[in-house]
Amino acid sequence: MQTYTIQTQGICPQAISYSIEDDKLHNVKFFGGCPGNTLALSKLLEGYDAKKAIELLKGNDCGGRGTSCADQLVCGVEQALEGKVTANR
């Protein structure tokens, strides 16, 4: 299972980590932000198809910021699937 950690921009959490195995999301964790919302998002996405998550959540906006926790997560997932970010060691 490949695990990734991305630094975020424009949202409350400073970083997000997640794993991808067989194109499914696992172990999504937000470092900071609204605990209720980020925990709920993590639970809902556990085992969810990564490409479907991208389609569903990309471009989601939070309070006019132009991005959101969900958007930042799926932008990172998209980069991981395209091989543009390196997995943690």
Image (spheres, grey):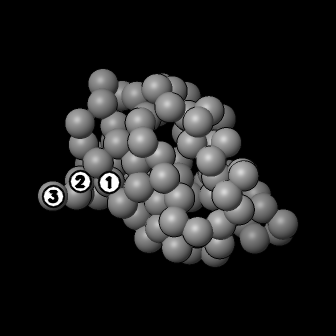
**Pair 3/2: label in front:** 3
Q: Is residue 37 above or below residue 26?
A: below
Query: Residue 12 placed where, x, y %?
Result: 65, 72
Tell whether 67 sits left or right of 89.
right
- Residue drawn at x 40%, y 48% is 18
Residue drawn 23% across the image and 53% down it: 87
The reply to whether residue 12 is visible in this rendering is yes
Q: Is residue 38 above or below residue 27?
A: below
Report x, y in % for residue 53. 56, 34
Residue 20, quarter of the rendered image: top left
Write down the residue under mark 3: 89
Give the label on residue 87, or none.
Answer: 2
**Kind of residue at badge 2:** Ala
Q: Mark 3 packing: few (<14 Cα in 10 Å), some, or many (20+)?
A: few
* Residue at screen point 67% across, 58% down: 35
Q: Residues within 10 Å of mark 1 (few under 14, many from 20)?
A: some
Instruction: Report if residue 55 is visible in the image.
Output: no
Label 3–label 2 contact, CB within 8 A: yes
Q: Quadrant of the C terminus?
A: bottom left
Give the alpha-carbon distance from disc 1 to disc 3, as whole Å. Answer: 9 Å
Do tag 1 and tag 2 residues touch (Cβ < 8 Å)?
A: yes
Residue 88 lies left or right of residue 69; in this view the side is: left
